[in-house]
Amino acid sequence: MRKSDKKLDNQICKTLTNVCETALEHIFGFQWLTHRVNYQHFPASLIVTCVFTDQSDLDRIQLNHEDSSLRNLIVEALVDIDIRLDKPEQQIVFDSEEACEVSHQGNWERRLGS
């Protein structure tokens, strides 16, 4: 990773940490989020994964349109640091601890393809 990529990654981490703290306070079932990116294809390669406890939490946030609210919060936070996502519906995804446990025995690194 180039020095400029590292600096940008730190900025993304700080921004997403703030989003995470807000989501933990306001969205029931939200657990954490992470990102992965290939800086050779940035920003198109930026993927933000928002993790909830289980499928019922994912169903509930979609029913209550909290998924859109969280996606908008992430998009706006990234715009504040001059990062614009071309396809937020594809670049901000939702997952659950339950699904990772079932399909990858809780191994998030393998699940996310890191």
Image (cartoon, rainbow, N blue to C red):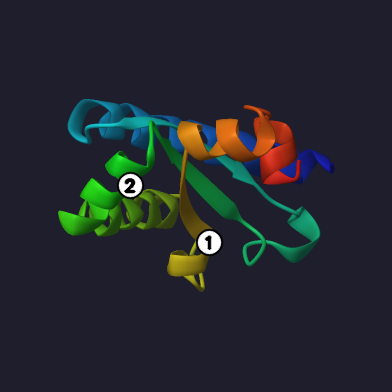
Read off the residue under disc 1: 91
Q: Residue at x 52, y 49 (%)?
A: 48
Residue 25 placed where, x, y %? 22, 26
Q: Residue at x 48, y 54 (%)?
A: 93
Residue farthest toward the bottom in the current orientation of the protein: 86
Q: Secondary structure at mark 2?
A: helix
Front disc: 2 or 1: 2
Left or right of residue 7: residue 94: left
Relative depth, front residue between 50 and 58: 58
Residue farthest toward the front in the current orientation of the protein: 102
Specify the label residue 49 is tagged with: none
Left or right of residue 55: residue 64: left
Residue 32 placed where, x, y %? 44, 30
Q: Earlier in the sequence, mark 2 or mark 1?
A: 2
| Residue 78 seen | yes
For disc 1, the neighbor class at 10 Å (few under 14, some 14 to 19, many from 20) is some
| Residue 15 seen | no
Disc 1 marks a residue whose amino acid type is Gln
Dots 2, 1 in contact, CB < 8 A: no
Quadrant location of the N terminus? top right
Q: Is residue 96 above or below residue 68?
A: above
Relative depth, front residue between 85 and 28: 28
Q: Is residue 28 above or below residue 44?
A: above
Residue 61 placed where, x, y %? 24, 49
Q: Quadrant of residue 64?
A: bottom left
Disc 2 marks a residue whose amino acid type is Leu
Read off the residue under disc 2: 58
Q: Secondary structure at mark 1?
A: helix
Find the distance from the CA under tag 2 to the CA under tag 1. 17 Å
Residue farthest toward the right in the current orientation of the protein: 1
Q: Quadrant of residue 65?
A: bottom left
Relative depth, front residue between 62 and 76: 62
